[in-house]
Image (tube, rainbow, N blue to C red):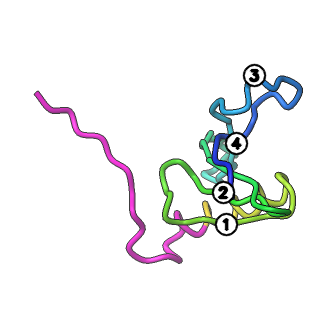
Amino acid sequence: MFHGGYIKPNKDNPADRYAPADFSLCEKKGEHAMETKKFIYYQEEDMFVGWFEESPDYRTQGETIEGLKENLMDIYHDLNSGHISCVHRVGELLVA
């Protein structure tokens, strides 16, 4: 059985258990630019499984939260570098 949810932004506050998390990524564009991405994770036995909120089809895992974050960084760079073809994206459409 696995339990889903967002990673805790405040590790010391159990009330924040399912609150959205900020995940900062660095990209080189002349200067270092920071971008925040949300990700979802759950713990299954001794592994943490997670994915970016905007890319649920691309999942990874780690033995720790920090390991999971490192693997999410790799996926982020792969998704945005063209190494993965036919990447599914989330868009917005304003309708009346």
On the image, numbered disc 4 is attached to which residue?
24
- Sequence-wise first label, 2 or 3: 3
Residue in the image at 75% along x and 35% along y? 8
Task: Residue type at mark 4: give it.
Answer: Ser
On the image, numbered disc 1 is attached to which residue?
60
CA–CA distance in space, label 1 to label 3:
26 Å
Residue in the image at 10% along x and 27% along y? 96
On the image, numbered disc 3 is attached to which residue?
15
Task: Residue type at mark 3: give it.
Answer: Ala
Q: Position of residue 85 (x, y in %)?
A: 43, 77
**Is label 3 in a helix, a strand or a loop?**
helix
92 in magenta:
yes
CA–CA distance in space, label 4 to label 2:
15 Å
Q: Is residue 87 left or right of residue 24?
A: left
Tell me, yes or no, whether the two marked residues, 1 and 2, touch with CB atoms within 8 Å.
yes
Q: Quadrant of residue 61?
A: bottom right
Crowd band around label 2 with a 10 angstrom C-alpha radius: few (<14), some (14–19), many (20+): many
